[in-house]
Image (cartoon, grey):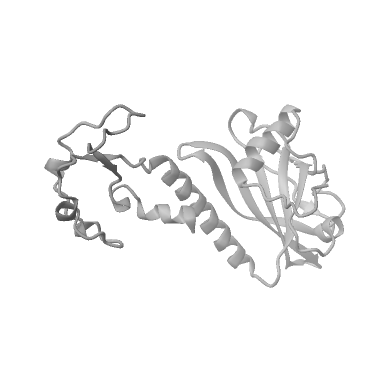
């Protein structure tokens, strides 16, 4: 049990790296509150989770019919796969996959879509052959399956783009201005967003090499400032602080 006031809300990357990987390797988990459960057994999702809309986490074993086929029946229905996205640790390293499922209830010769969805997290690479996966179950209000799928793909694309921005955004560089430089003349008025409004005399500003890191400029010496944020800020980096 988590202490009162705490919520278990790990990221996709954390579920793969700190929970599923450790589970497969038999190592200690960061939190032991994820139980083992047969999600592809005789019980439908509402008998496993109740009718609560909070997300529930489980480890389960896949029941493979062949190398590429898995039995997805559960109780009175079947888990229908909608789409799969890759989970990245950085822009080039894929550490896992996340599949989206909707639970369809069997009614005679047809099936009816329910409001239950499941995200199945699995490993890739050398550990791809394991049958152990980490799943989240959740009952969604009246959102259609197509809406869930669209939001699922948008969130996954956004997470990858944010991950890329974290790696690609360069750090700011300090500019050292000679003490005799007329700041009012060279800096002009600071704009709110348009970098073209800056009136830097760059040849004068960068002509002096900065001192060693940790050295303070002498009294009346050079003044360190930062360049405008727009010089190094990717517009997509706004997603980091949305």
Residue 41, placed above or below residue 102: above
Q: Is residue 16 left or right of residue 61?
A: left
Q: Nearer the viewer, residue 122 or 197?
A: 197
Q: Position of residue 126 (x, y in %)?
A: 61, 27
Q: Position of residue 99 (x, y in %)?
A: 63, 50
Kindly identify the residue that appears in the image at 75 percent across and 60 percent down.
Answer: 54
Q: Nearer the viewer, residue 139 or 221?
A: 221
Number of numbered discs present?
A: 0
Kindly identify the residue that appears in the image at 68 percent across and 48 percent down.
Answer: 120
Residue extending farthest front: 219
Kindly identify the residue that appears in the image at 76 percent across and 63 percent down.
Answer: 53
Q: Is residue 222 left or right of residue 153?
A: left
Kindly identify the residue that appears in the image at 41 percent across and 52 percent down.
Answer: 237
Residue 55, placed above or below residue 129: below
Residue 197 lies in quadrant: bottom left
Residue 23 lies in quadrant: top right
Q: Nearer the viewer, residue 204 or 232?
A: 204
Q: Position of residue 45 (x, y in %)?
A: 81, 57
Q: Position of residue 180 (x, y in %)?
A: 15, 42
């Amino acid at each position: 049990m988590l202490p009162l006031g705490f919520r278990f809300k790990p990221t996709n990357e954390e579920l793969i790296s700190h929970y599923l990987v450790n589970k497969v390797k038999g190592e200690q988990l960061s939190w032991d509150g994820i139980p083992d459960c047969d999600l592809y057994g005789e019980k439908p999702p509402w008998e496993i989770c109740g009718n609560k809309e909070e997300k529930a986490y489980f480890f389960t074993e896949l029941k493979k019919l062949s190398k590429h086929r898995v039995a997805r029946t559960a109780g009175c229905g079947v888990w229908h796969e909608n789409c799969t996205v890759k989970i990245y640790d950085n822009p080039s390293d894929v550490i896992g996959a996340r599949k989206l499922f909707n639970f369809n209830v069997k009614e005679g010769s047809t099936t009816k879509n329910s409001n239950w969805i499941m995200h199945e997290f699995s490993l890739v690479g050398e550990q791809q052959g394991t049958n152990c996966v980490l799943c989240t179950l959740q009952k969604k209000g009246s959102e259609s399956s197509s809406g869930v799928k669209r939001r699922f793909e948008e969130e996954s694309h956004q997470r990858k783009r944010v991950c890329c921005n974290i790696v690609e955004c360069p750090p700011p560089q300090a500019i050292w201005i000679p003490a005799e430089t007329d700041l009012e003349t060279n800096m002009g008025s600071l704009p709110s967003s348009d970098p073209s409004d800056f009136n830097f005399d760059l040849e004068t500003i960068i002509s002096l090499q900065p001192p060693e890191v940790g050295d303070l400029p002498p009294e009346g010496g050079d003044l360190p400032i930062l360049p405008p944020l727009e010089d190094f800020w990717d517009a997509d980096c706004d997603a980091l602080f949305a």
